[in-house]
Image (cartoon, rainbow, N blue to C red):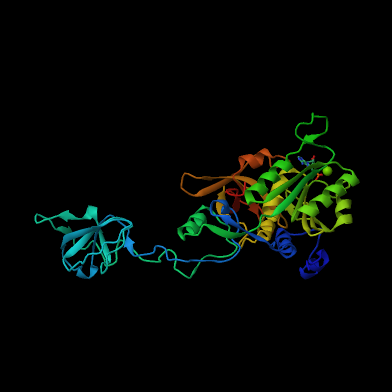
Amino acid sequence: MNPSIEQIAAQLQGYDPQALSADAVGEFLARLVAPVRGTEQVGVFDALGRVLARDLVSPISVPPHDNSAMDGFAFDGAQLAAGALPLQVVGTALAGKAWQGEVRPGQCVKIMTGAIMPAGLDTVVPQEFTKTLADGRIEVPAGLLQRGDNRRCKGEDLLEGRPALAAGERLGPAASGLVASLGIPRIEVVRRLRVAYFSTGDEILSLGEPAREGAVYDSNRYTVHGLLRRLGCEVIDLGVVRDEPALLEQAFRDAAGRADAIITSGGVSVGEADYTKAMMKKLGDVAFWKIAMRPGRPMAVGRIGDAVLFGLPGNPVAVMVTFLAFVRPALLRMMGARSSAPVYLSARSAEAMRKKPGRTEYQRGIVTRAADGGLEVRTTGNQGSGVLSSMVQANGLIVLHHGQGNVAAGEPVDVMMFEGAL
Ligand code: AMP
Ligand code: MG
């Protein structure tokens, strides 16, 4: 059984829905959401961005044989001594073909990169370091090599019978290649997460509607859609829902029936006159929070039917920030991904920043490399929670943590980089 909001709240020390720290939000959500069940088999190309459902054990060793890392000459490294080593070339080992002949002391085999090391040979001298003597032998220069140099050992990348990738791995291009290197054409991944989204608010216009006084075009639907697509979720787009109880109820029920998670924007702040909050309360088990953060204070969280609900604020920057800080890690957990905590990079602030301890602030930042080679971050201009252009200009969010106070110019700050998420 899923725990109720009340049960989770009771487990958290000092839970105060009216002043929740960003850390407490993260802890709460980690208890609220659980990995979805259900897997599917996909081909390696289609596995990109998906989450591996079970440990993948290597059916073979990679590389499958000891082989040469260079074009050169393979020989028995036991012969290496203080002086130069002359060797007679008795054959050639090509990539993809084993060389079968016998090699005696004082002899070597010309070998190509990737070719199997002939039996008894363990060292390769790169071609460019050798010279050819008058009698046709090649010479390994003194002091250049140690036994075993320029040889790749069988299984040094992946060992037969050992886990190559662990369940919960989000498969990137490197993992795709690794799966393919094992000769595995299809793998089992967690099914796609289905996430329904709609915007609320009577002042919100859909694209195609004529502009009218007091109304704004719906941008949240597009930012959230993009953020969800980047996560590899299946997005169920329910558009803009007008502030009428019947329409809101229909949208929530529709979403809860089809999706693992529901995301809405707007209508969750204290002063809201509309029906969004009332409908969340009526249909689900929902907490309404004031988070000690900027931007993004209000947020509703809970469950409607079996779907997890994230009721985000309306302001466009607040939507993106609350998504990145809270919703994204929670969705990754639902997707079965192993590690979902954001990774921060440290950069020195190019400017002084005013900051009150007791809340987390997310400033839009531009990280660049300074003349001295260090990373430096400056804020984009207007930090208003409706200024979406600040998110476009930024390449990361400067995170000023809960307990942190004013920041002096030159002081290091944490930055959550957008790369991969935006
Ligand atoms: P609310 O949280 O509903 O009070 O909305 C806060 C602000 O965000 C208001 O200025 C809204 O007009 C704006 N807003 C709400 N929803 C959207 C949306 N989908 N796209 C753009 N702006 C929005
Ligand atoms: Mg509103």
Left/right of residue 258 with respect to residue 280 in the rendered view:
left
Q: Nearer the viewer, residue 235 or 327?
A: 235
The count of marks equals 0
Left/right of residue 133 with respect to residue 250 in the rendered view:
left
Left/right of residue 357 with respect to residue 130 in the rendered view:
right
Residue 305 shows in this picture: yes
Residue closest to the far left: 134
Q: Nearer the viewer, residue 229 or 17?
A: 229
Could you say where residue 379 lies in the image, as x and y percent from the top left? 62, 44
Q: Quadrant of ligand 1?
A: top right
Residue at 46% across, 48% down: 373
Residue at 29% across, 63% down: 117
Residue 268 shows in this picture: no
Q: Is residue 342 above or below residue 383?
A: below
The quadrant of the rendering that contains the N terminus is bottom right
Residue at 47% across, 66% down: 59
Q: Nearer the viewer, residue 233 or 140?
A: 233
Could you say where residue 362 lies in the image, as x and y percent from the top left? 67, 50
Could you say where residue 264 lies in the image, as x and y percent from the top left? 78, 48
Could you say where residue 241 lies in the image, as x and y percent from the top left? 83, 42
Left/right of residue 132 with respect to residue 189 in the rendered view:
left
Q: Is residue 29 above or below residue 252?
A: below
